[in-house]
Image: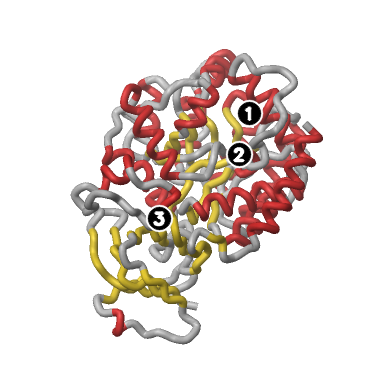
Amino acid sequence: MTVILKNANFIDWQNLSFSNTNLRVEEGTSGSLTFFDNFREIPVSLKDEIIDCKGKLVTKSFAIAHHHAYSALARGMPAPEKTPANFLEILKYIWWNLDKALHKDMIEASALATAMASAKAGSTFVIDHHASPNYIKGSLDVIAHAFEKVGVSHLLCYEITDRNGMKKAQEGLEETEYYLSKNQGLVGLHASFTVGDDSLEKAAELMRNKASGIHIHVAEDKIDQEQCMQNHGKRVVERLNDFGVLDSSKTILAHCLHVNENERKLIRNSKAFVVQNTESNLNNNVGYFNGNAMGNRIMLGTDGMHSDMLRTSKAAYFVGQENDNIDFTSAYGRFRKTHNYLNINSYTGDGENNLVVLDYDSPTEINENNFLGHFIFGLTSNHVQHVISDGKLIVKDKIIQTVNEEELLKFTKEQANRLWKKL
């Protein structure tokens, strides 16, 4: 089936030019996007879906550069046995406790919930960082199948770490190697302070053998730097650079809050990309992101807090007024940088036939000269009406089309309750 968008006010995501046009959206990862000035010129069949977009905005859909689908069932969960006093205790008493409790059905439920939330908020591509130390083998396939069921493209990795013992670290490496043998994906690492030299060397070698990149948390908290200096006599980015992690344009460095000038220079002169996760940083009270002197390869992620990229873009802008060199243009640039990352690394699933239709009822005029003001102060995920992923209509009138959302939410609630009992 081909989707045809009639009377569209189309916004080019790269140069922000506006045009009144009609679009024929072909299905598939390499499906084309064809523009017609005259609707009558479009070849139409009885199976085609025609959507009248009069008065609405049409542009490229969104992408999430760093997510944790496994945290989707955490909302409303019981309080930890001890109130965390610092970042390490947040990990120990909340997230490392939760990820150990996950089994297959919980992982599937988390991925389904994340995919549905992402799609309804306008994102058709998710880069995810997964952990489930008591269900490692096959975990990435579970997530992939759930995402694909909803219609959301993905780039997955499993979080390799030594914190659960070397046997689990090896299982993480094996799961990664197996998954990358048949899928696009990344080599995941938790963070420098839970990954020893042996695991880091094996992960870097796997990265090279699979022509992939490393997806790792970097200097999210000062403990990462303190442990690295104590155990390795160098800072985190310096350590990663010594192992060749920064040599790949597929490498993703998440957070990068507590980095010094030399580390910024290493990042700037490397091929690696950085992901900013403002709301998560605020929630964990670990500090503020500052993109100065790190180059222009900065993307935005949600870090499992939610799946709303318009929301996270606003947070990055507002919080950055005091702590970062960010304006309307650079906020939008970071919001869209994930597309560049996916494109230069030839990943599939983020072609031009990924679109979002926004029912944006602004009380003021919107055009290419003031769009960025609307992006920061007006547009929200509530305006997402239709979403097209790889040319397929996956959200229509705010309703998921590919799955029965009511049934799946019943399943996710069941799994959440089972998870909470284990906690």
Q: Name the residue under label 2.
A: 203
Residue 174, placed above or below residue 253 = below
Towards the viewer: 345 or 337: 337
Name the secondary structure under disc 2: helix
The residue under label 2 is which amino acid type?
Answer: Ala
Q: How far apart are marks 3 and 1 (CA)?
A: 30 Å
- Name the residue at 72% across, 52% down: 410
Q: Are marks 3 and 1 in contact (CB under 8 Å)?
A: no
Q: Position of residue 60 (x, y in %)?
A: 38, 58
Q: Position of residue 366 (x, y in %)?
A: 24, 52
> In this rendering, which labeled residue sits more in front, label 2 or label 3?
3
Name the secondary structure under disc 1: loop
Name the secondary structure under disc 3: helix
Q: Name the mark on residue 343.
A: 3
Please indicate whether residue 8 sits to the left or right of residue 242 in the image: left
- Name the residue at 44% across, 34% down: 276
Q: Are marks 1 and 2 in contact (CB under 8 Å)?
A: yes
Residue 210 visible in rendering: no
Q: Position of residue 372 (x, y in %)?
A: 27, 45
**Residue at the left extreme of this rendering:** 369
